[in-house]
Amino acid sequence: MQGTTTMNNLFGPLGKDNCLYFYFWSIFFFIMFVFTVCFILFHIITNPKTINTQMIFNSIYTIIYTLLPYYINRLMYTMCINSIK
């Protein structure tokens, strides 16, 4: 029975406290999202002559690049919490 215990310890389900991993990552990516939006708005306000198609495309891409991991980690946190209930 020692092998079964070792397998359960290594590959068995984790506790509810391990869901905090996704919670902290969602907070981190939300903060990154807010900073990104603020930086882009600051750049647009202070340098309005630099606005072109490439800048708009890069800004949208960067916003999505920070918003998507926030959403994914929030979704994973929700799934983790609800699956352990």
Image: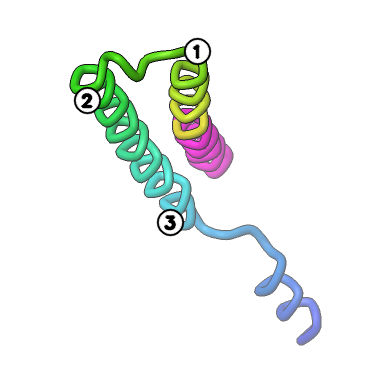
Q: Disc 2 versus disc 1: distance between alpha carbons?
A: 18 Å
Q: Main secondary structure of the magenta part?
A: helix
Q: Which is more toward the observer, 76 or 80?
A: 76
* 53 shown above or below 47: above
Task: Tell me the amino acid under the disc marked 1.
Answer: Thr
In the image, the segment drawn in magenta is: 67-85
Q: Which is more toward the observer, 63 or 40?
A: 40
The percent position of residue 39, horizontal first and vertical second, equals 27, 31
The percent position of residue 69, horizontal first and vertical second, equals 51, 36
Left or right: where 73 falls relative to 3 = left
Task: Tell me the amino acid under the disc marked 2.
Answer: Phe
The percent position of residue 79, horizontal first and vertical second, equals 56, 35
The answer to whether marks 2 and 1 mark residues whose Cβ atoms lie closer than 8 Å is no
- Lower sequence index among marks 1 and 3: 3
Determine the secondary structure under disc 2: helix
The percent position of residue 32, horizontal first and vertical second, equals 35, 39
Q: Residue furthest front?
A: 49
